Image (spheres, rainbow, N blue to C red):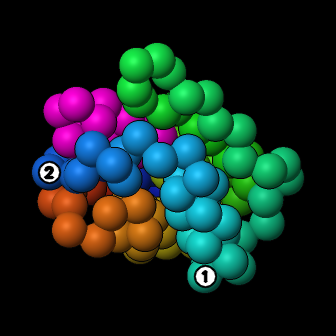
Amino acid sequence: MLGVHALVHLREGSFAALNDFTGLVNAFNKTIGHFGLDNLYDPQIHQFEPQGLTGIVLLAESHISIHTWPERGEAAIDVFTCGERNSKAIAEYFCKTIDSQCAYAVEVVER
């Protein structure tokens, strides 16, 4: 097995949380620190106008990415890790760090 891919549909997120550039940087960094992941570069995030964010952090273990639709309260999150890392747990923590009140569904695929 090469790794585990966790794909997340986050729902019922707050507009403010899903459109918060600084909050997303903090969510990436908290998740990286909590799981002891090795980031290769600082999180790269683009803020769209009038709203929405897309971001990625490249890890030695692979990556975490997100695309948000604040006006819909939704986001798509992609966590891929190789080795012994738990992609599902990382994805769940990342969701809670972005917006602790959101709902989400995680699909896990082994590669």
| Upstream in sequence: badge 2 or badge 1 | 2
Residue occupying the point 41% across, 29% down: 52
Q: Is residue 81 visible?
A: no
Residue 104 in the image: x percent, y percent? 20, 56
Q: On screen, 53 above or below 102?
A: above
Residue occupying the point 36% across, 53% down: 17
- Tell me where the magenta segment starts and ends, as one range: 66-77
CA gap between label 2 and label 1 equals 24 Å
Residue 88 in the image: x percent, y percent? 39, 66
Query: Could you say which quadrant of the image residue 39 lies in?
Result: bottom right
- Say which of 70 and 84 sits in front: 70
Q: Are marks 2 and 1 in contact (CB under 8 Å)?
A: no
Residue 87 in the image: x percent, y percent? 47, 63
Between label 2 and label 1, give the one nearer the viewer: 2
Disc 2 residue crowd, few under 14, some 14–19, many 20+, Cα 10 Å: some
Residue occupying the point 54% across, 63% down: 27
As for residue 71 lying within the magenta part, the answer is yes
- Total number of numbered labels? 2
- Say which of 19 and 64 sits in front: 19
Mark 1 secondary-structure assignment? helix
Mark 2: amino acid:
Glu
Residue at which label 1 appears: 34
Residue at which label 2 appears: 12
Q: Is residue 27 left or right of residue 42?
A: left
Q: Is residue 37 left or right of residue 30?
A: right
Q: On screen, 24 above or below 34?
A: above
Mark 2 secondary-structure assignment? loop
Q: Is residue 77 visible?
A: yes
